[in-house]
Image: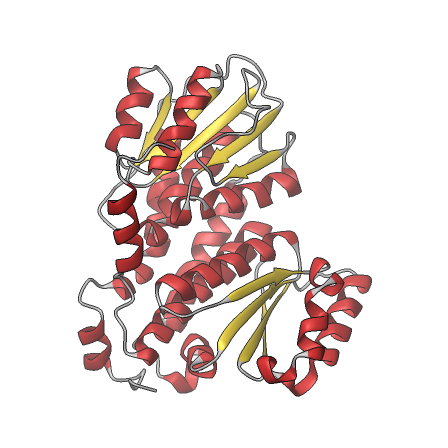
Amino acid sequence: MAVDLDDAGALKALDPLDMMGLTLGFPEQCATGLRLAREADLKPLSSPPSNVVVTGLGGSAIGGDMLRAVIEAQGRVPCGVNRDYHLPAYVGPDTLVITASYSGNTEETLSAYAQAHEAGAQILAVTSGGTLAERARSDGHRVILVPGGQPPRSATGYLFFPMLVALERLGLLPDQGAAIDETIARLRAQRDALGPGVPAARNPAKQLASALHGKVPVVHGTTGYLAVVAFRWKCQFNENAKTMGLTNAYPELDHNEIIGWVEAPTQAANWALVTLRDPDLSPKMQKRVDVTTRLIGERAAQHVVTAEGDSLLARMLGTNYLGDFVSVYLAYAYGVDPTVIENIDTLKVELAGVAA
């Protein structure tokens, strides 16, 4: 590895924009997002929606994936996540569209917002400002403003909790109070266990980052919410650690990917499998995961992360938080700055002004 993960000075030198500091502040960020959503002036829905669509990209969209996981487990209407310039054709007056753009200037989200407004959809904008906030306010739609000034991928708490609480307040989700309290308490305990001051010998995030160094991480989710977290881990490896990553979910991966593992051992030797497991898998799913990991065997290094907590929310956010730490430590292990994303910035500049 390029860096000793217990060398505080070396880590700080690699991280001038302080992605680790943003990661350490995540529990307080969640609490702030919660407070802002509870204090926001949300006008009632004009009619009960038949569906919810969250539209956003990148770090602004992952909160929508998390919201969808909660709605699928507890909600009363279906929820989709849109990552495109264009909304699905079914969006109309009986749709609640949540436009999530941390900067407020994401071009795909602004395009989708315009379509939602034209279609007469009920709209909630979650943003730190920018064009989205201006347009939503001018058009008379609901807006929850959150603090700005950091990379969107580090602002999940600001984006997810306002959406979650807004749907609770609008009557589309049951009371989330107990789950939220458990989640924030567990996140604070995790921070104490995973922060840079905890030596690698006692720090699971540093240990996993070291094990993934030099490998292509492949992250498998064993349930719906862990499929979301697995995708988030992959994206954090891409942006923070500047490395490739792959993701898939059970049971789908047993209908395709498993063949690649077994029949391409030379490729698999360059991969490292991380299986995100829920502690309450059904006997059938438990057997499926056990057989799959046995078939993969020693073709690749294997690691297991078991979600912790009583509520789905605590399990999802806690497993997500571990991945955030792992991705930053993996960036350090490679000797790269976890914050800069030059290729994405270049794309945005060159796409500006081109019609969708």
Give the camera-side residue of 134 and 39: 134
Q: Horizontal and vertical percent for residue 14?
A: 22, 74
Indicate the colouring scheme.
secondary structure
Does residue 144 sit above or below 61 in this rendering? above
Residue at image x 77%, y 74%?
291
- Looking at the image, which residue sits at the far top? 46
Q: Is residue 33 visible?
A: yes
Residue at image x 30%, y 86%?
4
**Is residue 137 found left or right of 214 in the rendered image?**
left
Give the camera-side residue of 138 and 88: 88
Give the camera-side residue of 320 and 57: 57
Does residue 142 sit above or below 101 in this rendering? above
- Callout count: 0
Residue at image x 48%, y 46%?
180
Q: Horizontal and vertical percent for residue 137?
A: 30, 20
Q: Horizontal and vertical percent for residue 271?
A: 54, 78
Does residue 143 sit above or below 322 in this rendering? above
Residue at image x 38%, y 84%?
200
**Is residue 253 found left or right of 208 in the rendered image?**
right
Does residue 193 sit above or below 222 in this rendering? below
- Looking at the image, which residue sits at the far right? 284
| Screen quadrant of the N terminus | bottom left
Q: Is residue 189 visible?
A: no
Q: Horizontal and vertical percent for residue 215?
A: 48, 80
| Screen quadrant of the C terminus | top left
